[in-house]
Image (cartoon, helix red, strand yellow):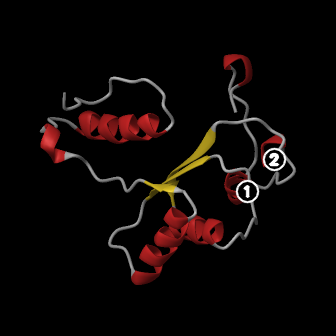
Amino acid sequence: HLPGNNLVYYDNDDIAAVLASGSFQSEGMIVIPCSMSTLSAITYGSSNNLITRVADVMLKEKRQLILIPRETPLSTIHLRNMLLLSEMGVHIVPAMPGFYSKPTSIDEIVDFLVGKVLDLLNIPNDLYNRYV
């Protein structure tokens, strides 16, 4: 939450924070990294902390929700949960580098992922090389 270009911190236990209300205006939410525990809670509507509550709000308000799972390898349960979320309109963006761009550093690999996430939110960026 960045009002007036200032960072506002909310404790994950503060489930009554302004972010947890559907009337709070936002474009969307990114959970990076997203543990399989958090992904599962979001899948099944278990709003037991601020992250999962805000994700639930994103779903009910039909706003962008982008999850970057951090687990590997993925179990069948993980894949099923991701499929269910995808069917609900959630963007699942595994942290897999695009080697076709021939990255030469860890920074380029990270920039590729961040650029892809920003693209989903229609935030202009030049973090990775695009095919033209």
Marks 2/1 in contact by CB < 8 Å: the verdict is: yes
In the picture as drawn, the residue positioned furthest to the top comes out as 4
28 or 50, nearer to the observer: 28
Residue at left offset 46%, top offset 40%: 120
Residue at left offset 35%, top offset 42%: 113
Q: Amino acid at mark 2?
A: Gly
In the image, 96: left or right of 61? left
* Residue 75 sits above or below residue 71 on the image: below
**Which label is found at residue 22?**
2
Looking at the image, tell me whether mark 2 or mark 1 is earlier in sequence order.
2
Q: Position of residue 78 (x, y in %)?
A: 45, 75
In the picture as drawn, the residue positioned furthest to the right comes out as 16
Separation of marks 2 and 1 at Cα, in angstroms: 8 Å
In this figure, what is the number of numbered marks?
2
Q: Amino acid at mark 1?
A: Lys
Q: Position of residue 7 (x, y in %)?
A: 68, 27
How many other residues sit within 10 Å of disc 2, few (<14), some (14-19) or many (≥20)?
some
In the image, 6: left or right of 114? right
- Give residue 19's quadrant in the image: top right
- Give residue 129's quadrant in the image: top left
Q: Which residue is mark 1?
A: 60
Q: Position of residue 39 (x, y in %)?
A: 56, 66
In the image, 111: left or right of 13? left
Q: Position of residue 2 (x, y in %)?
A: 68, 27
Q: Where, quadrant-wise, is the N terminus in this rendering?
A: top right
